[in-house]
Image: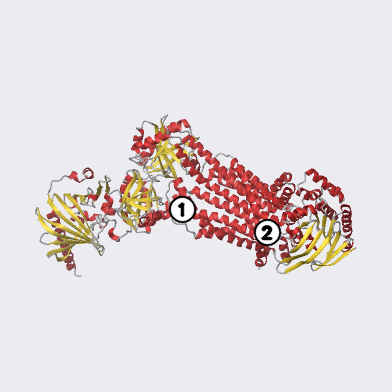
Amino acid sequence: MIDLQNVSKQFDGKRKVIALDQVSLSIARGEMVSMIGASGSGKSTMLNLIGGLDRPTSGEIVVDGERLGRASGDQLTRIRRDKIGFIFQFFHLLPTLSCLENVALPLHLRGWSRRRIEERARELLDLVQLGHRLDHLPEELSGGERQRAAIARALSVYPPILLADEPTGNLDSQTGAGILSLIRGLHQRLESTILIVTHDMDVAESCPRTIRLKDGKVIEDIRR
Amino acid sequence: MLLRLLTWPYVRKHKLRAILTILGIALGVIVFVGMRTANDSVLYGFQQTVDRLAGKTQLQISSGETGFPEEVLERVQALPEVETAVPVIEATVRTGLPGQGNILILAVDMTGDRGLRQYEFEEGDESFIDDPLVFLAQPDSIMITSEFAARNHLATGGRISFDTMIGPKQFTIRGIMKSGGLASAFGGNLAIMDIYAAQQVFGRGRSFDRIDLKLKPDVPLARGQSALQTLLGSGYQIEPPSSRGQQFESITRIFSIGASLNSAFALLIGLFIIYNTFAIAVTQRRSEIGILRALGASSRQISGLFLLESAILGLAGSIIGIAFGLLMARGMANYVSSLFGEIYGVAQRVETVAADPKIVALALVIGVATSMLAASIPARDASRVDPAAALHKGAYESFSPRESRLRLIAAAGFLAIAAFSLFLRGSEGLRLYAGYLSVVLAAILLTPALVRRLVVALRPLLRSLLPVEGALAADSLIRSPRRTSATVAAVMLSISLVAGLGGVSNASYESLMSWMNNVLNPDLFVGASEQISDRSFRFPASIGGELRRMDFIDELQMVRTARVMFRGAPVMVVAVTIDSLSRRVHPQVIAGDPSTMYREVAAGRGVIFADNLALLKGVKLGDIVEIPSPSGVLKLPVAGITIDYSDQQGAILMDRSVFVRNWKDDTVNVFRVYLRKGVSASEGKRRILDRLGAQSRLFVLTNDQVRRFILRVTDQWFALTYMQIFVAVLVAILGIVNSLTVSITDRRRELGVLQAVGGLRRQVRQTIWIEAMSIALVSVLLGLALGAVILFYYLGIIREQIAGVRLEYEYPVRIALSLIPTMIAVAFLSALGPAESAVRSSLVEALEYE
Amino acid sequence: MNKFLAVLFFTAALLRAQDARRIMQEVQDRARAASQRYEGTLKVIDSRNKISEKRWTYDRIGSAGSSKVVIRFSAPAEVKGVALLVVNHPERSSDQWMWTPALQRDRRIAFQDRSTRFFGTDFSFEDLEERDSNQYDYTILGEETVNGAPCWKLESRPKKSKSSQYTHAHIWVDKARYVFEKIESFHGGKLIRRLIYGDYRRIQNIWTPLTMEIEEVGRKSKTILHTEKLQYNVPMKEEQFTLQALRRES
């Protein structure tokens, strides 16, 4: 489902930083993988590359059969839009839009009909148990609720891949556990491929496979 | 130090915005320097020519523009206070030489004129003119300047042709003056001829335009002046040559006011752009300011930092503005010069367009002061930043409830002043200016509240159009009222001024059209110049007899126009055969009985005043007015007041007999010709030219041609308005680009999310375009509404303070309707750059951005 | 000083002045004629020796301060018909008018312009004027010989100081014939013009100079007037010396 071959990422600033160094990795369909490592180990970079938010300096990334390296900006967006759902640490809900509107956002961007968007958005919010908060603005929701809404938005078209960047990083442990179980539930129900970046060992260990990065290299790949 | 540490990195990061801000001030300074320099150059050119022509002249005697009988000269020469007094006739004629335009002919009495003017001659300085007796004996003698001779490859004995009363006439060059001094007057396009020959050639009869004189060495100027005034009476103006410049200034006053208003307008716009930039910068740099405050910077240091920044930007903008303003001045000077020639019939020539150090200094001061003034409010806001609060990110882009309330109260106060001033009696000027200013200030204060309401109303519409892009664009505007309203206020003001000026220009055209329809109705105009406003040439009255004998002419009116001094202003006397005129024209009568007033005027028992002149000079129906004439002061009652656009300064209509009697001058400027039924204008024109064209200088203009001329000149006049539209567009571009560059920074994360969840580049671009177009739409709507109010004040100010012209209030719907799409298109174009920069920025950074 | 001597001195001065006036009166009386006519050729030689020539006819009625003069140019062709009328007055400056036929109009030569040059010659308009000897005060400065003729050297000063561009003049009067040999006109201490009379002939019993050479000092040019066909007491009428006549006869 996700294949990395000799992927490197180098940031050209005043000092060159090698964020990823010749990483090769393969994640199969339906896997739920956690990625851990210290700050600056390259785990977020890898997530961004897989999600098509950024491009590798060298190497090839194939996501669900699509070669990201050769895709144009808009092609990348289309790949993202059809195959990938993002879950962010800081939720990144748009503050001026209601819960329902936030979830509907990607569907609108796909140009769906209003009726279909409405149906799907409600369905998704029900799925994350936010059916009762449709018209609330993000600032009126609790942290956990915001992340649920963000997850609902990521699920919009039931993409085969979900990428989560510290999904519980900004939540207390109890709420975090709730979100994690939601994600695990979705994994089982939707059979999505899920990649979670985290530094929380509890979260990491709850996944069947854990990849550890250090200095831009995979130093450990544990399957439980 | 603070500047280098803090400002420079910020400026470097926001290069575009810094450039735009500098341009904002530069724009104002360009218009100021360009307009002023052009205007001053024209005035200076005129004054320069006057000075050079004047030589040692201490006083000049004139009687308006009309000239006066020759006999006056001997009386003046006999006065014991006078040392030398010489007659002068001045005329501007076309040279007919390619690229030379007009030449100024100075006609003097060669026997005595050397006492006043220094004629320096080419080839052997004492040879005078080749033969002075021949020069005087031959009326075709002319003396030119060496510069003009060189330019046109002319030499002594050569011939040159000028247009004269008796058609194009060959002159023989019998003298060439050395360049410099007198010879450099009018840019060297100067010719000297004998005054008695000039009387014939220019149809002056036995009159002089002017007497130039020098007093005896021991006579003070004031004593000479009063002795002459006693001798000649108040029908004569006795002034030093420099006052001709003042008169010229007074004639062109309305244009100068317009130019000043334009500069003020451009600076005001600059002010808003600076304000906009600084308001945005202060909000963006809030946390930085908070850190500084926490580290111990005083609030004075903080506001000083911003003021210093604004002063530097202002200085940079001023320098650029001065440079470009001076570049523009040359083109503008030529435009102004030709406009003056056509409207006022006053010949002048721009010789040099030079930077006046005073204007340059003033521009620098104004540029820097405007910039600092604009930055003063944001700087004050910056100094009040609470260090603790600033370090927390929050909704600082919005107004605090207290501030909003204060704004509303202040706005209500200004509106109350404006409403109150409507009922104020007494000082019209104060009433209008106070009202105008209050309305504008209220509008600026209300902008955030109005913008919010309008955008909230607009949001559902945008959302239904493009659900995500539209709604997000509207939200961006609502979320940042400071940023948005600073931009909207700038664009709104410029739009309102355009709408106001558009309304004025529309109303002027309307009024002019109706005057032309009612009054300007002869089939043909027979004049001595191609330009109907040119009064250099006049016909002898006898031509009237010849025209009258033509059987295809139904009615003929002889018109003599001349500027005279009335209550300190040069106004136009229009002398016509009233009896005939009253049968043909139907002007809009403001005061007086239309059926009897013409009878009184025709009988020489009254005059008719143009409404604008009456208003400016406070003349009422029935007043006895005093009009200076060479025969003494003419006292006549005002029999009527009508709308009359014969002259921008205002016209006094009198019967021809009164003029001939008092000015001892029966020449004619223009014949108004009504043809018999069945004779077409072109046929009439042809037949008049057939009979008279060969024997005298004669131009026959059809009604259509005259109308087109007037409209063309009016168009040129209002070209200023189009320039303002151009400036408004520039302001919109600057303001919107400025606003958007900030907006895309603010919306960076939002735009990143949008792309992360599947938004295409097109969709990102669209939301920015919509934001820009929404700003434009809101600004235009508010601007057009404000313009409706401003137009009211403009018309009032024009009527009461500037031109006295009565203009109907009519909203310039066409201009308004065309502004909406124009400004939206402008906004779209302005948004292209920022939108591209938004889609090209790194998604990763955008999402990390917090 | 001795009172007697002083009286004697002043009396002597007075007598000398009286002598001067008598000499001038004699000059004026001897030249007196009812009228005069001649044809003149005016040659102007400028600083570069360029010579221009004009011809005129000269008519005068009356003499000295009550005379009237009409000068009509006859050549060259460009100036033919241009005329000048000078009406002298015993008590004040003359009136002068110029007539230009091409323009068909006359122009007054204003008093202020009398010191300007008469159409490029070395004469000024004032020099065309004839004044009565009573308008001047005279003193004898001495005796000198000019052109071989013994002369009195007189000084003349106008009685009304501001009526002339000259403050005074030196006049050399031929003792034998009572005619002018030379006149030098001054402004302050500066010599302005020098006029030399020559070629005296006795015409109708009046000693008449047929050549006059005038020079505006400092300009390096010279103007020479030759007269021909000079006659006195030609029948003329006062009406011929009016502005109307000037206009009519062109």
Dot 1: element: helix
Neighbourhood count class around disc 1 (C-alpha, 10 Å): few under 14, some 14–19, many 20 upward? many
| Res C102 visible | yes
Q: Please name the residue shown 87% across and 59% down the image.
A: A172
Is B181 displayed left or right of B8 in the figure?
left
Dot 2: element: helix
**Residue B554 % position (x, y):** 40, 31
Chain of the residue under the numbered disc 1 shown in the image: B
| Res B427 visible | no
Residue that extends furthest to the right in the rendered view of this protein: A224
On the same chain, marks 1 and 2? The answer is yes
Distance, label 1 to label 2, CA atoms, is 42 Å
Q: How many marks?
A: 2
Q: Amino acid at mark 1?
A: Val
Residue nearest the observer in this picture, B59 or B846: B846
Is B343 displayed left or right of B147 in the figure?
right
Residue nearest the observer in this picture, B482 or B732: B732
**Residue A87 % position (x, y):** 81, 56
Residue nearest the observer in this picture, C3 or B307: B307
Q: Which residue is mark 1?
A: B42
Image quadrant where residue B146 sits:
bottom left
**Residue B634 % position (x, y):** 40, 40
Circle number at residue A46:
none
**Residue C160 % position (x, y):** 25, 56
Image quadrant where residue B123 sits:
bottom left
Q: Amino acid at mark 2?
A: Ala
Q: Which residue is mark 2?
A: B281
Is B135 displayed left or right of A129 in the figure?
left
